[in-house]
Each structure stands twice: as C-alpha cells, then as structure tokens.
Amino acid sequence: MRLRDAFLLAAIAALASGAPARGEELTGTLKKVKETGAITIGTRDSSVPFSYLDGSQKPVGYAFDICLKVADAVKAHLKLDKMEVKLNPVTSATRIPLIANGTIDLECGSTTNNADRQRQAAFTNTHFLTATRFVAKKDKGLDKTDDLKGRTVVSTSGTTNIRQINEINTARSLGMKILPAKDHAEAFLMVETGRADAFVMDDVLLASLVAGSKTPDAYTISSEAQSKPEPYGIMLRKDDAPFKAVVDAATAALYKSPEGKALYEKWFTQAIPPRGINLKLPMSEAMQKALANPSDSPDPAAY
Amino acid sequence: MFANFDVSVIASSLPYLFGQGMVFTLTLTALAASGGIVFGTALAMMRLSGIPGVTHAAKIYVETMRSLPLVLVIFWFYFLVPYIGAWATGSATPIQVGAFASALVTFTLFEAAYFAEIMRAGIQSIPKGQTAAASALGMSYAQTMRLVVLPQALRNMLPLLLTQTIVLFQDTSLVYVLSLTDFMGAASKVAQRDGRLVEMYLFAALVYFAVCFTASWLVRRLQTRVAIIR
Amino acid sequence: MNYNWNWGIFLEPSPEGVGTYADMLLSGLSWTVATALCSWVIAFSLGSVIGVLRTLPSKAANAVGTAYVELFRNVPLLVQMFLWYFVLPEVLPTEIGTAVKQLPDAPFYTAVLCLGFFTASRVAEQVRAGIQSLPRGQAMAGTALGFTTAQTYRHVLLPNAYRIILPPLTSEFLNNLKNTSVALTIGLLELTARARSMQEFSFQVFEAFTAATILYVLINLVVIAGATLLERYVAVPGGR
C-alpha cells in the first residue's frame, strides 16, 4: 500500500495548497454543493452503531459522525459560509440507486466495499472491518454454517451477505430457505419472533442487535464466519474524482488523528443511545492498521 | 399475549407517531389527491377529446398504471424521478429529489389514472344536449368544459372522488417499503426498536380504522346532500 | 442519461445459483399467480356469503355483514398483512403460535389468508350491489314458486347477480392480483420482490422493473381476455 499512500499524500498536498481556489471549474458533486449550498447524507434506520435512529428518532452513529466531519471538510474546501446538511433515509436496497440517481451525495452506514459495487459507486477510505456470520437463538444449537441445513434463514435484502449465503446455499446444497428482509431490525425481528432460525449479517451488526435486544443472553453468534473480514466504506458517486479527493483527504486525516480513535471508542467501547448499551468491541489489530493506513481497497486481503 | 400489553409504549411515542408520521401521511394524501384530481381530469378530457394521438396516449397511460401494483410503481419512481428531472431541466447529472417529493410525484401520477376514470364517467354523465346548448351559445370548448361540464361532473363525482381519496390515504402506508416515516412507518420503527409489535400494529390499525370509518361515513352523508338535481 | 443499459442481463446467471435472472423473475411470477388464485378462492366464497348476509331480511345478518365489510375495508392492506404475520401468532396460545411461525412457506399462507379476507370485503360489496340491482319481483317469484330463502338465492338471485357483476368482479380479481405485491413486506418472493432482488444483485434497476412491468401488463391482458370469454360463455341466450 506504499504507492497508494504516496498518491494519497500527494493528493492531500495538492488540496492543501488550495487547488480549487485557482479558479478551476468545479464539477459534479462539488459544483452541485456549491450551487445549492447543501449536501445530502443518506442515513440508515438500524445499522447500530454506524448509522441508526436514537430515542428521539434522530440519526446518529459512528459513520454518521464521520460523514458530518466530511461535510465540514467539503464546506471548508468550497469556502462556503453556510452549508446545509440534509438527511435522507436509505435502506440496503435503495442506497446504491439513490447514490447513482443523485438523491444522496454521501451514504453513511455499513456498506461493504467490494469490487462489484465499485462498478456502481465509489468508496472512500475504510472505516471498519467485519465478517459475515449468523445469529440464532441459543436453544436452537446452531453454530457452524452446515448447521443451517434445511433451515429458514433471513438476511437483509440488497446486502453482500444475502448474496454470500445464497452462494453458500447452492455450493454446499444446504437447502436453506432464504428470506429477504427490508432492514436489519426487521430481519432480527424475524429471528426474535421465531419466523426465521438464523439471521446472516456482518458480525458487528449482529453483536449490536443482540446487545440491544430485550434478552441478549438468549442469542448466540456463529463461531464459523461465512466470509473473510470485509471493509466498510462511505459511498459516493462514481466518476467524480474531485469530490472523492476531498472526501478521501478528509477521512484519511480524521482516521489517522487521535480524533478518529476517539470516535471509534465513543461508539464501540462506551454506552451509546438510545438505551445506553455498551458494545464492548475494542479496536482490533487489523482495525488499528486500517485506520493508520487509510485505504479504499475492496480486497479483504489488503487489510 | 394480551397479558403484558404495554400501553405506555404507545403513549410515549404519540408525539412521534402523530407529529411526524401522521403529518407526513396527511400532507402526502392532501397534495397527491389535489394533484391527482387535476391531472386525472386532464387525462379524462384527453381521453374523451377524440383527437387520435391524444386519446390513445391518455388511454395507454391510464390502462398501464391501472394494471401495475402500487408497490412496483413506488419503486419505479423512487429511482426514476431524478433522471426524469435531469432530462426535464437539461441537467447533465441526475437532479436531487427528496423522499417526500418523490413519493408525492409517485402518488399523484399513480392516483391520477384512477381519478381519470372517475372523471371520465363524470363528464360522460352530463347529457350531450348541454354541450350542444353551450356551443349554440357560442362558447368555445374550453369555456364549455370550464363553465358547464366540469362543475357538474365534479359535483356528481364528489363522493367517488372522496372515496378514492380515502383509498389513497390507506395506500400511502406503502411508502413503508422505502423506509419513509409516514404514520405506518413511524409505528413500525417504534415497534421494531422496542420489540412491541402487538401494541404498535394494533394501535396503527385502530387509528386507520377510526379515520377511514369516520371519513367514509361523512362521505355517505355528503352523498345524500349533493345527489342531484338532474 | 448516465445509466449503463444492459438488456442481456436477463440471460446471465443469478447469484442464487439456480438459473438466470429471467428464471428468477418467472419464479416470482408463478408465486404471484399462485397467491392471487388461492386468495381469490377465499375472497370469492367468503365475499359471496358476506354479500348475501347483507341482503337477508335479518337485522343480525345485516349487522354481521356490515361489520365485516367496514372492518376490512377501513384498514390499509399493509397493516392487515402485519397483523396476520406479526401479531396473530403472538396472541394465539404459545404452542399454536410457534407452530404457525414454523410453517414452511409461512409468508405464502399468510398472504393468501390476508388477501382472501381483505378482498372478500370488496367482493361482498359487489355481490350485495348485484343482488340489490335485481328487480324485487325475482325474489317474490321465487317465493311464489315455493322456494325457501336458500333456494331462492341458489337458483334465482345469485345466478343472475353473478352475471351482472362479472365485469366489476374481474376488476376486483385484478386488484387482488396486484395486491399480492404488498406481501413482499412479509417476505413473499413474488414478482415485484424478485424484480427488486434482481435490481440489488445486478444493479440494473430499469431493466428489472421494465421486465416486471411488462409481465404485469401481460397477465392483466390475459385475465381481461379470459373474463370476456367467460362473459360470453355464461351469457343467458336472449337475455339483456
């Protein structure tokens, strides 16, 4: 990743030297933000603790905080006195079309950065690493992938996870019945109410759903993962290099600074709204490395 | 079980349910109904115009809309509207359309197809002699429509238009599929957050029932009042 | 428009590993049709009973019929779907509730029941309107022939009423078919749901929705053609 870092530093240096002030024509998202004086952030309902609704139904979260910092950076970059930050709710299924069709400018949530998606959208530096696992009620005794044979399994529609579990289902001919749910809360609800045996999702989201449930002790997360740890990134529109450069520079600076670490700790090792749950997920070594060397690579092996 | 039916969860979320959810639902219903009736009337007039291309265009629009499920139409427009906007304004990139605006466009265009059929029946219910009389008086087509036909058609069809608006009010609950916060969306967000499905969904059903039942009853009373005078 | 069209997408294999995207949409279509037909059986039979109740010369029967229609017409279908799927199993005794939840294809059965009961209220209104539109002399003639009330309905009123309401019943059938798409909220993999998954997997939004649109329009045309044939087949020779 050395070469990439060098480019990144060069990009930051270019930006720091006030590239746009030289009267260059603004394009794409930057132009739009400048003209409308507003940037729109896509938020999620229930991606705890990345982007979700607190007790008063206001969006909060780790990725949401990062997006606010990015918005500040965009505002500073464009030298705007005032910039409105608009919020627009998105779901796993609507987020990519809404980025593409211009409804939102930044998607703050728990979006896995992979090569497939890079054809539709761009990602800034990785803010989290997570693997696919499943959660089930303890009394069902499900722990390994093969335990899911013939079971009803739910996952959130539009995620990489539902795709992976479909592929595993076919590859190992497990005969699972896979239901798509609208969002994570609805999917977890299916497990909670016994409509599905297991919910396949990124392990960090499962951990927070379990921690936030009425009976955290009743659930268990599979020990076998269904994928390698994959990177999460904030999504932006594709083919908009000037905007991406601003966002990349802002996130890289944030992740490397003590503020980035503090932000992580605020959401993963301290009590979070709405009910003061502590996820108790101290920063892993891989995560420390990922934040120290910001990268937007979709390849799990790069981390 | 009803044994642990928790009323407090409903009570504590009332401001959110009504202040945000119901306001969204009612605003969307009112605006989409007004827009739908205007556009629907235009469609009905196009369909009855007898001008070959225009009649067909209106017919194809109405029949296609009426053969599609609303859920599919909601998805269509949510993704398509920004592109249409870009095309209409000649902008190079898709323009930004908020969730509410998008829902409003969807419901206006979708319900217009249904309002158009009601208005078509309304316009056809006016005896031919009246339009003949109007043109004998030297009125133009526009004048005939505005001064003679449409006022009566609207009055005759008022109960049906209002009934369709009640249907629209119920239909707006489907914006749930886009995670927007209408009344039902608000109820389900609280239900999922607090794990109180039974309470929230029953309460939502009760509120919808009360509103629609009262509204239908009012429409029936109105029907006996405005019934005409032929 | 900066959108990458790719109409060949339908022939590409879907990530579910069984067949192409086209197969995925067709499987959605078959669930749509199956759900629509099964729920129509409930809607038609129950709706006829309720409709008849509302025309009987009995206050109690009228009240039951009216209560049913008002209840099912004044609550949005989506809410009813959730009541059947999420609320009903919770208020049943625990063992039955659990058994209900673990049914294979639970979304399908739930959708069939929910749509059946929902559409029944609309069918009931049509049946009532049909019966009430018949000249009163028909019921009287039945009585004069010595028919019981049941026989009058069976041999005189209903056969005539059904013929009259065939067109509105066709449109209720089509509404019922379109309404199956609401069941995607409880996990039924019908046509709209499949178009949506296809969009999510392939990112080809407009191709997926265009295909679904065409399929819906086609089923509508088939149903309307079928209804026209049926109308001609059941027409009473020399009647109206």
Image (spheres, rainbow, N blue to C red):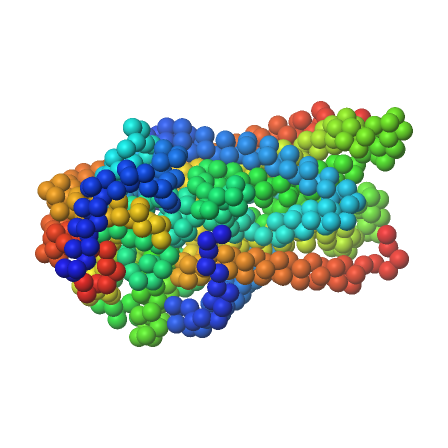
Residue A226 appears at what percent x and percent y? 24, 65
Q: Nearer the viewer, residue B130 or C88?
A: B130
Measured along the vertical axis of the image, is residue C217 above or below residue B31?
below
Measured along the vertical axis of the image, is residue B135 above or below residue B111?
above
Residue C204 appears at what percent x and percent y? 45, 59
Q: Is residue A228 left or right of residue A97?
A: left
Q: Nearer the viewer, residue B203 or C45?
A: B203
Q: Is residue C44 visible?
A: no
Kindly indicate the quadrant of the structure image that contains residue C236: bottom right
Residue A152 appears at what percent x and percent y? 35, 63
Q: Residue at x 73, y 53 (%)?
A: C166
Q: Is residue C184 left or right of residue C131?
A: left
Q: How many marks?
A: 0
Which residue sits furthest front? A22
Residue A101 appears at what percent x and percent y? 43, 48
Kindly indicate the quadrant of the structure image that contains residue A86: top left
Q: Quadrant of the C terminus of chain B?
A: top right
Q: Residue at x 62, y 41 (%)?
A: B112
Q: Residue at x 78, y 28 (%)?
A: B143
Q: Is residue A148 visible?
A: yes
Q: Residue at x 37, y 63 (%)?
A: A178
Q: Quadrant of the N terminus of chain B?
A: top left
